[in-house]
Image: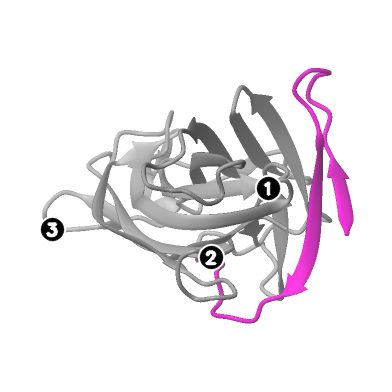
Amino acid sequence: MIKVKKILSASLTTALLLTSSAIASAQTVSPTEAVQSVQQEFSLQLDDMTTISTPYDPALYDFQRSDLFNEVVVKVVDKNSGQIVSTYGEKIEVKNKPAGISIMATGTYSTRTTYRTFTDPGVNGQHFAGGDLYTVYNCYQSGSFGQINSVSSTYWSPMPGSGNFILESPNAQTVPTGNTGSFPTNQLTTTGTVVLSTKETKAFGTSIGSFSYTSGSDGWSRYAIRNAAYNITFGN
């Protein structure tokens, strides 16, 4: 188990625990991430119950973590350039016990919203546009035991603070992929595709084509994000 620690401030920083494992399924690295390792994936611990898979090797990237009330944001930073290459996050909303549930009465029910940011390839570490791929799921936990009971939604949202663009043809889905292959489960796999579309011709003083956008006859330039994916594991 690899320990990665990045100091932000005394109140906001904790250690990140990352463990590597060989990829046993289809490659989850998007075309926008050519500098990432394609041999391994790593488990990024968002809290004491939730981990999310990441292709970013802690030998090459720092993980800057900010903890807020019932929310965590982790920025992945290239150690060489100092540029942010992706962001992970999770927000937790504690729920009342569902009506009609007579068992598992002593634990905690929650709805968790987890996401990862996918972007265009960028130029000199700057990205014109990107999308956050969200998974909203419902959980039960008691001590270190946890299970995912259902998924409420899976969707794309524009990356905050980026350029003038829209998301075209968003597609996203989540399936249970844990020990049972059905609900309740301990693991989810979220996958998606989306097209970043803009009428801008330049970004950061550079041609939009330099960001790998392709110009269309309709006046729009587009960049397709394919094979966006991550795994969520809940509980021990």
Q: Residue at x 43, y 40 (%)?
A: 128
Closer-to-camera residue (37/101): 101
Numbered disc 3: secondary structure: loop
Q: Which residue is mark 1?
A: 49
Which region is colored magenta? Answer: 1-30
Q: Which residue is mark 3?
A: 217
Is residue 26 found left or right of 161 in the rendered image? Answer: right
Q: Position of residue 207 (x, y in %)?
A: 38, 44
Camera-near label (3 vs 2) is 2
Examine the residues drawn in magenta and state their main secondary structure. Answer: loop
State how many labels appear: 3
Estimate how packed mark 3 is, as few (under 14), some (14 to 19) or many (20 or more) residues with alpha carbons within 10 Å.
few
- How far is mark 3 from mark 1, CA to CA? 49 Å
Q: Residue at x 51, y 45 (%)?
A: 114
The quadrant holding residue 179 is bottom right
| For marks 3 and 2 on the same chain, the one whose residue lies earlier in the sequence | 2
Amino acid bearing label 1: Met
Camera-near label (3 vs 1) is 1
User: Could you tell me which quadrant the N terminus lies in?
Assistant: bottom right
Numbered disc 2: secondary structure: loop
